[in-house]
Amino acid sequence: MAAGQVGGAAAVRSVLQRLAEGGSPERSELAAAVRFTLAALAAAAPGRSVEVRVPPWGAVQAVAGPRHTRGTPRAVVETDPVTWLQLATGALELSVATADGRVRASGERSDLASYLPVDGPWARDV
């Protein structure tokens, strides 16, 4: 495993632990965890038809289909960093987060349920 993967996985585990304990994650760890899991999603669901946004930490294009090149993408999924990490790690179901307004999704192919949770090394020893 590359050094970036180790650091990213450790950040994910640390953020999940802090959240489970009722605390707030450190800003730098939250940013690293979000970026790492977004990259894992992009690797697991290659493509450019859906833009997944987790402001302020990152955005990726993923999912096979028509390629987005300019302007607003046809399909956008946006959420906050904590909700994203919960979705990416399986701690929260996409349908629940969408129903209660924590996830905003629009456009064709914006249902990421088949790609979540994202498989990753953070799942080990959590």
Image (cartoon, grey):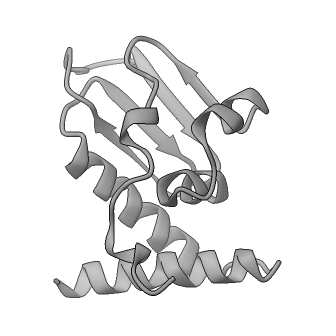
The residue that appears at 30% across and 86% down in the rendered structure is 6
- Residue 14 in sight from this viewpoint: yes
15 sits to left or right of 10: right
In the current view of this chain or complex, which residue is farthest to the front?
Answer: 125
Image location (x, y in percent) of residue 124: 39, 81
Vertical placement of residue 80 versus 45, above or below = below
Please name the residue shown 37% across and 66% down the image.
36
Of 116 and 7, which appears nearest the observer? 116
Relative to 38, say whether 4 is above or below. Answer: below
- Residue at the right extreme? 22
- Find residue 23 and report its horizontal and vertical position in percent: 80, 81
Query: Is residue 28 among what the camera can see?
Result: no
Residue 44 higher or lower than 48, as above or below:
below
Coordinates of residue 84 in the picture (x, y in percent): 56, 52
Residue at image x 49%, y 41%? 53
* Residue nearer the viewer, 57 or 80: 80
**Residue at (41%, 76%) from the top-left corner?**
122
Q: Position of residue 87 (x, y in %)?
A: 55, 51
